[in-house]
Amino acid sequence: MSGALLLVAVAVPGAYLAGERRLHRRGDRWPARRTAAAVGAALAVLAAALVPALLPGHGHGHAGGFPAHVVVHLLATMLAPLLLALSAPLTLALRTLPRAGRTALLGVLRSRWARAVTRAPVVLVLEAGGLWAFYLTPLFHLSHTHPWVGVAAHVHMAAAGYLLSAVVVGADPLPRRPGVPARAVLLLLAAAAHDVLAKVLWARGLPGHGGATAEVRTGAEVLYHGGTVVEVASAVALFGGWYAREGRRSRRRARPPVAVEAPAEVEAQVRAPAARRSPVR
């Protein structure tokens, strides 16, 4: 698991920065805040990869391992996807990929599959359902005896976390993105599902006596409070973006029209009937 996280922490920012350099060579600009978000996502994944070394016991099913596992979950499947969505990777790819790559990516974004998985109810089921299925069924125990189960579960949760963040706060083009009120409701429901899961784990523990009660409760508290921090950050990004967009629209509406003086010959061509127009030389 740590090796896969290290690979992601190196490959994703490498590809992102390569695309940004291509833009700069063309003379185009790219917002620094998006680059900072991409670097932040890579650092979150890197930190998740280092947690097993810093907190021994992770990944063996022992009592002391569950809080560390929760920290990995928060960093790799919640914080990193949020920062990645804020970095607009799809927009960067559409501006830097060769024509064939852009055509393929646009085909995916416009496909029925993309329209289906970005619908708010589907995003909520993928996000909350994956969490509940992993922590409240034998999947959690299987992830320790069969590591590929844990990798597959974390890939699903990271992908679902990215989908949620992309729909709620992402700057990338998405088919039929809901309005701000609907996105706020989606975020609220996802946060509620996350908080209820943490409370269930605190009260009932992991399936099959997956750890000492005290350690499982510590992990549940980390899950609850850490998840709240990420969810509040998502809400700030959502409403901050909405406020900035509305401010720009208000300034545009309040700006007086600018009169542009056109050359007399061009003005005559514009005013003349279509049948009498002659090309401007």
Image (cartoon, rainbow, N blue to C red):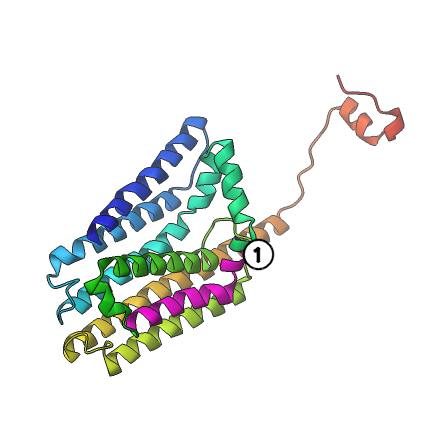
Q: Which residues are magenta?
A: 114-135
Residue 240 horizontal side relative to residue 138, left or right: right
- Among all residues in the image, which is located at the extreme bottom? 203
- Among all residues in the image, which is located at the extreme top? 281
115 in the magenta segment:
yes
Position above or below: 61 against 251 = below
Residue 137 horizontal side relative to residue 273, left or right: left
Residue 275 horizontal side relative to residue 195, left or right: right
Q: Residue at x 89, y 27 (%)?
A: 275
Q: On the image, which quarter does residue 19 sit in?
A: top left
**Count of number-bearing discs:** 1
Q: On the image, which quarter does residue 261 sit in?
A: top right
Q: Secondary structure at mark 1?
A: loop
Position above or below: 209 against 271 = below
Instruction: State the residue position of label 1.
Output: 176
Q: Tell me which secondary structure the magenta stretch mostly adopts.
A: helix
Callout 1 crowding tier (Cα within 10 Å): few <14, some 14–19, many ≥20:
few
Amino acid residing under circle 1: Arg
**Split into 4 quadrants, where in the image is the N terminus?**
bottom left
- Among all residues in the image, which is located at the extreme left? 56
The picture places residue 29, in percent across and down from the top left corner, at 44, 35
Position above or below: 58 against 135 = above
Q: Residue at x 25, y 82 (%)?
A: 204
- 246 or 44, nearer to the observer: 44
**Split into 4 quadrants, where in the image is the C terminus?**
top right
Residue 112 horizontal side relative to residue 130, left or right: right
64 in the magenta segment:
no
The picture places residue 83, in percent across and down from the top left corner, at 35, 53
Q: Residue at x 40, y 60 (%)?
A: 160
Q: Residue at x 48, y 49 (%)?
A: 172
